[in-house]
């Protein structure tokens, strides 16, 4: 379903997920960079209600952060 997006985008990575100890620390790390918070931390049913958030970096792609 994302093939059209991938064909016309400059991103290197479509989507990658990192597991972290603290989402708050990640938000602080990204705040001074060119990352855009796409989704604030919220419980993810798929991951037993652990917090998940998404960040987008132009020409790189989408980062998922899972606490």
Image (cartoon, rainbow, N blue to C red):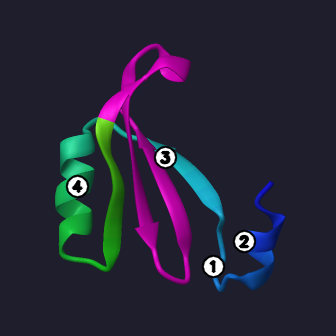
Span colored in magenta: 42-67
Percent from the top left, x then y, of residue 67? 36, 32
Percent from the top left, x then y, of residue 34? 32, 80
55 with respect to 59 (left or right): left
Please tell me whether mark 1 sits on a helix, a strand or a loop: loop
Percent from the top left, x then y, of residue 35? 34, 71
Q: Residues within 10 Å of mark 3 (few under 14, many from 20)?
A: few
Quarter of the view holding residue 11: bottom right
Q: Which residue is mark 2?
A: 5
Camera-nearest residue between 13 and 2? 2
For marks 3 and 4, the one nearer the N-term is 3
Please tell me whether mark 2 sits on a helix, a strand or a loop: helix
Q: Main secondary structure of the magenta part?
A: strand
* Cα–Cα span, label 1 and label 3: 18 Å
Q: Which residue is mark 1?
A: 11
Per the rendering, the mark at residue 60 is: none
Q: Which residue is mark 3?
A: 18
17 with respect to 52 (left or right): right
For marks 4 and 2, the one nearer the N-term is 2
Disc nearest the viewer among 1 and 3: 1
Task: Find out whether the residues at labels 3 and 4 contact each other: C-beta distance under 8 Å.
Answer: no
* Cα–Cα span, label 3 and label 2: 22 Å
Task: Find out whether the residues at labels 3 and 2 contact each other: C-beta distance under 8 Å.
Answer: no
* Cα–Cα span, label 2 and label 1: 10 Å
Q: Residue at x 59, y 54 (%)?
A: 16
Quarter of the view holding residue 37: bottom left
């Amino acid at each position: 379903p994302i093939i059209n997006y991938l064909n016309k985008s400059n991103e290197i990575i479509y989507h990658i997920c990192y597991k972290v100890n603290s989402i708050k620390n990640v938000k602080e790390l990204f705040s001074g960079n060119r990352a855009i918070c796409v989704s604030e931390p919220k419980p993810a049913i798929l991951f037993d209600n652990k917090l998940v958030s998404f960040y987008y970096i132009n020409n790189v792609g989408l980062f998922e952060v899972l606490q």
